[in-house]
């Protein structure tokens, strides 16, 4: 069996790795498995603004129709909009065509169940099994039993109205710069904030099919930072291509990442008595400063593997309402079933209004510890975690850091690397600590390339 699904759906180079033929098979097999209990099931289909969206959408819809299901075409809409519409329209499933923050040449496909949540691993495995069968034996209805296409021209408006209704206050007069990444948020985000009374300055809101995520959006916030200061705005908001994540900028031009946003929202919900079970869910990549901030608030913290789907799974299992990742996926399960960048932005702006405090002050809830992430090339990733020398190297650094830092070592799921993350109060020492561990990993796993490459820090 081939493994098509990653932690966030299927991704690949559009028209080469993720071909229209493959999209057709995903539509066909996915629609069959998800909806086989109903004679006339329906599936919501959305896409972002990248040029390959039309190609893959056509093929995906053809696959859905070929097994007799109805395809509800939502057009360009954020990923969380598909999750919302799937529930609201009482559809049997939803599909989003997007590669999120990836470059324009990539694209992807992700499925949602009728409840608006991403599919369980077990159902993805069943889709893959059918995809890999040598013979296609799925139903091929004819005549009146073929599936139909339903075009919902009001899909974006429905989702925008939902977002507006989540705001507990008006944003009258607030000057906001909104970086839409030339993606799925371009039409909706400025409209939502304008409807709430904000003075909106749009940025990267003119998608042409090829400029999605190009030096803009949540992964390239420099232009947003400058625009906020230049315009004298109170808030800057940056989404990614499918608008399921948010990175903010305060009025001084400083970045406010997912950890800060989650911390601010946690305190707001706590003060309002709405932080169910007094718990927040994050991944192991959350900064130690965030962990300490939650301890100071006496908020329980549950940490999962990297990936918003694991955050959501833990939230559903425990009945929690707030979770997030440093990358900007913030999940508020009492409002929507998946990470929702525009929804998060509305809630964050509402906190500014309710507290009458600037974001630069609200972000003082935590202090971000310097963090260094290193990719260590390894000929083999097998058995590294059981290697005694690697364990001792990690433990030695952890002992030196004590309660003021941490080490996280994990294999890459897609590349021949073992990733070493070291975090602590003294940035000058992090590279020394990381190299100490990396040197042992290289010697124990087999060197692919001799260079030591710190890839990111903060």
Image: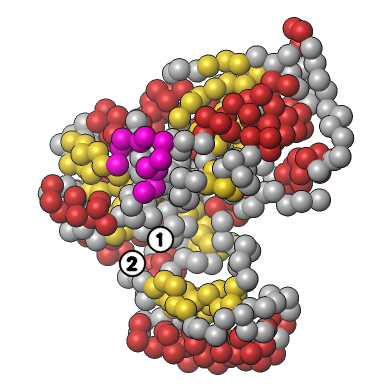
Q: Which region is colored magenta? A: 204-214
Q: Which residue is mark 2?
A: 366
Q: Which mark is residue 259?
A: 1
Count neighbours of disc 1 (C-alpha within 10 A) and say few if under 14, some if 14 to 19, many if 20 or more: many
**Residue 210, magenta (yes or no):** yes
Which residue is at 40% across, 60% downward?
259
Residue 289 is left or right of residue 255, and the answer is right
Task: Answer whether labels 1 and 2 touch (C-beta < 8 Å).
Answer: yes
For the C terminus, which image quadrant? bottom left
Which residue is at 30% across, 29% downward?
191
Q: How is the image coloured?
A: secondary structure
Which residue is at 56% across, 89% downward?
439
Q: Which mark is residue 246?
A: none
Q: Nearer the viewer, residue 232 or 378?
A: 378
Q: Which secondary structure lies at badge 1?
A: helix
Q: What secondary structure is the magenta-colored segment mainly?
A: loop
Q: Nearer the viewer, residue 156 or 116?
A: 156
Residue 81 is left or right of residue 70, and the answer is left
Note whether residue 185 is visible.
Answer: no
Q: Nearer the viewer, residue 260 or 409?
A: 409
**Residue 400, magenta (yes or no):** no
Which residue is at 69% across, 27% downward?
63
Q: Which secondary structure lies at badge 2?
A: loop
286 lies above or below 422: above
Residue 318 is left or right of residue 356, and the answer is right
Note whether residue 72 is visible.
Answer: yes
- Residue 226: image location, x then y, percent: 19, 55
Give the tally of numbered discs. Answer: 2
Labels 1 and 2: the sequence-earlier one: 1
- Residue 389: image location, x then y, percent: 66, 92
107 lies above or below 164: below
Report, in whole angstroms, how far the alpha carbon at label 1 lies from the one at label 2.
9 Å
């Amino acid at each position: 069996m081939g493994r098509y699904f990653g932690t966030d759906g299927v991704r690949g180079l559009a028209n080469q790795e993720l071909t229209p033929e493959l999209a057709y098979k995903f539509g066909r097999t996915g629609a069959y498995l998800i909806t086989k209990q109903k004679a006339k099931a329906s599936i919501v289909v959305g896409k972002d603004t990248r040029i390959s969206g039309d190609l893959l959408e056509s093929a995906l819809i053809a696959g859905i129709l070929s097994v007799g299901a109805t395809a509800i075409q939502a057009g360009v809409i954020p990923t969380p909009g598909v999750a919302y519409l799937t529930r609201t329209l009482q559809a049997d499933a939803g599909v989003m065509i997007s590669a999120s923050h990836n470059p324009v040449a990539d694209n992807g496909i992700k499925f949602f169940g009728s409840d608006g949540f991403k599919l369980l691993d077990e159902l993805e495995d069943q889709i893959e099994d059918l995809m890999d069968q040598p013979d296609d034996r799925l139903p091929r209805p004819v005549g009146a039993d073929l599936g139909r296409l339903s075009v919902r021209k009001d899909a974006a408006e429905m989702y925008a109205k939902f977002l507006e209704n989540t705001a507990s206050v008006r944003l009258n007069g607030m000057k906001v710069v909104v970086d839409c990444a030339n993606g799925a948020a371009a039409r909706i985000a400025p409209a939502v904030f304008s409807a709430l009374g904000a003075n909106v300055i749009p940025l990267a809101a003119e998608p042409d099919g090829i400029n999605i995520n190009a030096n803009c959006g949540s992964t390239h916030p420099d232009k947003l930072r400058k625009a906020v200061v230049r315009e004298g705005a109170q808030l800057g908001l940056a989404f990614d291509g499918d608008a399921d994540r948010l990175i903010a900028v305060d009025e001084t031009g400083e970045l406010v990442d997912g950890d800060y946003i989650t911390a601010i929202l946690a305190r707001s919900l706590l003060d309002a008595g709405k932080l169910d079970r007094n718990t927040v869910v994050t991944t192991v990549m959350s900064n130690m400063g965030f962990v300490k901030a939650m301890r100071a608030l006496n908020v329980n913290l549950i940490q999962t593997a990297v990936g918003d789907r694991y955050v959501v799974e833990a939230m559903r299992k425990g009945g929690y309402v707030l979770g997030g990742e440093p990358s900007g996926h913030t999940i508020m399960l009492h409002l929507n079933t998946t990470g929702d960048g525009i929804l998060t932005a509305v809630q964050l702006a509402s906190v500014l209004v309710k507290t009458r405090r600037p974001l630069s002050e609200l972000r003082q809830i935590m202090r971000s510890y310097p963090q260094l992430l290193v990719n260590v090339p390894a000929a083999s990733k097998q058995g590294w975690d059981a290697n005694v020398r690697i364990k001792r190297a990690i433990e030695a650094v952890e002992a030196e850091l004590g309660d003021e830092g941490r080490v996280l070592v994990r294999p890459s799921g897609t590349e021949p690397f073992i990733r070493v993350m070291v975090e602590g109060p003294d940035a000058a020492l992090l590279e020394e600590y990381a190299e100490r561990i990396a040197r042992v990993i290289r010697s124990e796993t087999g060197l692919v390339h001799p260079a030591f490459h710190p890839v990111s820090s903060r």
